Amino acid sequence: MKRILFFALLLGSFNDLFPQKADRIRSREARQWFRSGVWAPQGLGMDIHPSVDFVEFKKQYQANKDVWDAAFKAIAGADKDLSTFTESGKREIVKDRCHMIVSEYKPKNAENIRLEGHQNFIDIQISTGTVLWGTSTVEDSKVIVPYDPATDNAFFRSSKVKVIKQKASKPYIFIFFPKNLHIPAYAKSSVFYDKPLKKVVVKIE
C-alpha cells in the first residue's frame, strides 16, 4: 500500500512538472520571437515595455498579423513628445478592427485612480511625460464597476498593483491584453504638470 501511495505521489509530481516545463518553453520561445523583431515595422523608434505578456503578444500577432502591422505602422514615427500626432481625436486604422485615439490630458493623482479592464479590445498605449503605470490581474482584484459592453470597460480595485515608473525622457509602448488590468498613466500626488500631456491609444479588436 505504501509503495502504491509513493508511486501515486511521484506520478502526481511529474504531472505538475510537465505543464510548468511547457509554460517555460513557451515563454522562452515567445521572448526569442519578440527579440527577433519580426513584428516590428521599419521606423519604430520606441521600445515596448518589458512588462508585456510575450506569450500572448506572439499568439495575438500571429493570429491577426495584418491588423497588428497596421497598428504598429500607425505609431512607427512616435518620438518621446509624440510630436507627429498633431490632431486630437479618433482615427480608424483598419475598418471595424482597429482605431487610434489621440488626446491631451492632465494625469490623475494616485488617490483618484482605479484599474480598468476590457473584454473585446487590446490596448496599445503611449504617453508623454513622467508618469506611473499600474498593472494587476483579475484574480488579485475586486470589481467596483461591472463590465459595460457599450464602453468595453470594467473597473477594479486591488491591493496588489505593480507600479511602473516612466521618465519623460524614455516613454514606452505599453500593451494590455484583456486579462491585463491596468491603470493608464497617472501621477504621484506631489508631481505638478504645468501643461497637459499627450497620449496615444490604439485599440485592436
Image (cartoon, rainbow, N blue to C red):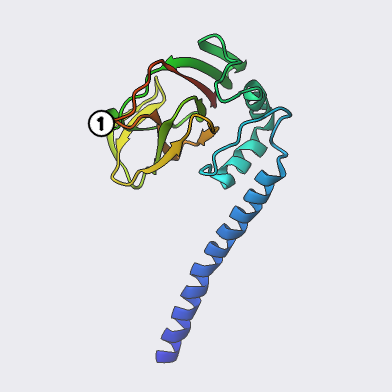
Across and down, in percent, residue 171 comes to 53, 31
For the point 58% across and 22% down, which residue is it? Answer: 98
Label 1: few (<14), some (14–19) or many (≥20) C-alpha neighbours in 10 Å = few
From the viewer's perspective, is 40 left or right of 100?
A: right
Along the line of sight, the residue nearer the viewer: 199 or 57: 199
For the point 41% across and 85% down, which residue is it? Answer: 5
For the point 42% across and 35% down, which residue is it? Answer: 133
Instruction: Tell me if residue 56 can be seen.
Output: yes
Across and down, in percent, residue 1 comes to 40, 91
- Residue 173 figure quarter: top right
The residue under label 1 is: 111
**Which kind of residue does numbered mark 1 sit on?**
Glu
From the viewer's perspective, is 184 left or right of 96?
A: left
Instruction: Tell me if residue 1 can be seen.
Output: no
Regarding mark 1 in the picture, which secondary structure is present there?
helix
- Residue 67 figure quarter: top right
- Residue 111 figure quarter: top left
Along the line of sight, the residue nearer the viewer: 28 or 195: 195
Q: Is 147 located above or below residue 1 in the figure?
A: above
For the point 54% across and 62% down, which residue is it? Answer: 19
